Image (cartoon, rainbow, N blue to C red):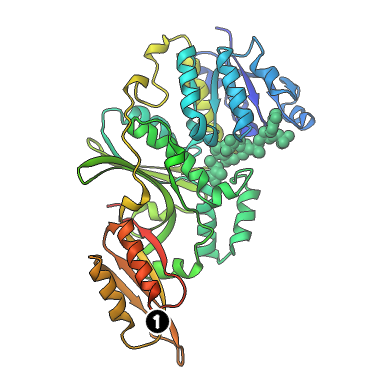
Amino acid sequence: MKPIKVGLLGIGTVGEGTFNVLKRNQEEIRRRAGRGIEITMVAARNTERAARLVGGECEVVSDPFAVVDHPDIDIVIELIGGYELPRELVMRAIANGKHVVTANKALLALHGNEIFAAAQEKGVMVAFEAAVAGGIPIIKALREGLTANRIESVAGIINGTTNFILSEMRDKGLDFSTALAQAQGLGYAEADPTFDIEGVDAAHKLTIMSAIAFGIPVQFDKAHIEGISKLEAVDIRYAEQLGYRIKLLGITRRTVIDGVEGIELRVHPTLIPTKRLIANVEGAMNAVLVQADAVGATLYYGKGAGAEPTASSVIADLVDITRLATADPEYRVPHLAFQPNQMTDVAIWPMSEINTSYYLRVYVKNRLGVMADLTRILADARISIDAVLQKEPAEGATRLDIIMLTHQTREKNIDAAIAKIEALDTVVGNVTRIRLESLS
Ligand SMILES: NC(=O)C1=CN([C@@H]2O[C@H](COP(=O)(O)OP(=O)(O)OC[C@H]3O[C@@H](n4cnc5c(N)ncnc54)[C@H](OP(=O)(O)O)[C@@H]3O)[C@@H](O)[C@H]2O)C=CC1
Ligand SMILES: N[C@@H](CCO)C(=O)O
């Protein structure tokens, strides 16, 4: 059988990794796919660099539309990144009847519904394993491996850059900007690293997993997003003393509140008990914990970013498409796991309704009755305290930190209690509040 012909858009970190792994393992991949897979065209802005990388083995062009419009190309790989240009390219590739592979979670989180609908209509596949958790085959696991289950929750460390920064800050005492510069140098960070730091990239990935887990449309605009930029080293240390580690976690979960079912969709720094496996995922590694009714808990772990780990997922998609290209589109695995006419419109909960536990750090004046005031405010709000940490103040110190861990309560309750605590004249500045998940 003739090799399947692939056009590559963008030959940066992931594009180069894809080109190299496909070349290195071409014979193994051909034996698995049933036919050869050849990159025959590459689009790059810097065509000289691209030509050097591909060594004359394929045509290099500067116009990516020349690739998506080329009649010989069967599959287009989009590895440019960003929103608008990739959207135009992917929609045009679909309109031209080409299958698409992309690692672009931003594109799918924002325009996925439109893209999958167009692909369904045209009978082509849009594959995106690399868009979530780099080299971990989590899309395949959620969409196919767990297909017998009712999925209850997905919680994951799904941004390598922030996990790398948090690990380096804790273990090596690096400051934030040095750790970020290292993550950029290693090719983990997004073109705009604020996407990583502010939790946007993790929310893109979580939005995609939520759609696949629960059979809902992608709804990035409903995600609650907080990153790690406001996290202070002192809270990382206090959390450790209490037996917790702080991770940037993406959580999506079915929850019934007052008899109504909804979906949680949130990304924020989270205290996790150190004894949980996922709390010990370090560096740029990712891990996704899935709770499902039949199988129970399953944990997926691996490299969440970088050239070849991500290439591994891109090429897995190429092989899938190669195998299924001749199958009747109706019998292929649906893009979002559920048949398009079987999606539900169950709503995403606003953050104020979410039930979780909290870490509170209150900076207080060293005066009699402070602790009594704090506990009274929490008791009045029916919030129980699970643990308290108060260090003996240094000789002559007039202010000190009081740390409290609470049992579960609704976010709007804790916010109201925090407002009352901040109004006390013994409390200095704002209360630091970090959510806590036991993940048991
Ligand atoms: N890096 C990683 O670990 C991971 C990345 N991803 C995703 O993969 C995608 C690619 O990321 P990554 O490889 O890191 O990004 P890079 O910035 O390393 O590569 C992007 C490439 O696209 C090229 N490009 C930009 N605009 C055009 C254009 N108009 N025409 C042709 N080529 C263009 C750039 O060329 P030039 O260099 O000449 O400007 C660059 O080589 C992104 O969506 C990212 O979110 C997903 C998982 C992991
Ligand atoms: N910037 C992303 C790349 C992988 O998607 C990360 O750090 O996880």
In the image, residue 390 sits, relative to residue 252, either above or below, namely below
- x and y percentages locating residue 131 in the rendered image: 51, 35
- Few, some or many C-alpha atoms within 10 Å of disc 1 (few <14, some 14-19, many ≥20)? some
Quadrant hosting residue 402: bottom left
Q: Residue furthest top?
A: 1
Q: Residue furthest right?
A: 48
Tally the numbered discs. Answer: 1
In the image: residue 136, left or right of residue 22? left
In the image: residue 70, left or right of residue 259? right
The local secondary structure at tag 1 comes to: loop
In the image, residue 368 sits, relative to residue 287, either above or below, namely below
In the image: residue 23, left or right of residue 285? right
Residue at which label 1 appears: 426
Is residue 291 at least partly visible in the picture?
Answer: no
Q: Going 30% across and 28% down the picture, which residue do you hit?
A: 147
Is residue 427 at least partly visible in the picture?
Answer: yes
Q: Is mark 1 within 8 Å of ligand 2?
A: no
Quarter of image, ligand 1:
top right
Quadrant hosting residue 146: top left
- x and y percentages locating residue 129 in the rendered image: 48, 31
Q: Going 44% across and 84% down the picture, which residue do you hit?
A: 399
- x and y percentages locating residue 263 in the rendered image: 32, 41
Q: Going 34% across and 75% down the picture, which residue do you hit?
A: 389
In the image: residue 13, left or right of residue 50? left
> Viewer-proximal residue, 352 or 396?
352
Q: Give the residue type that dot 1 points to.
A: Thr
> Viewer-proximal residue, 78 or 117?
117
In the image, residue 251 sits, relative to residue 270, either above or below, namely above
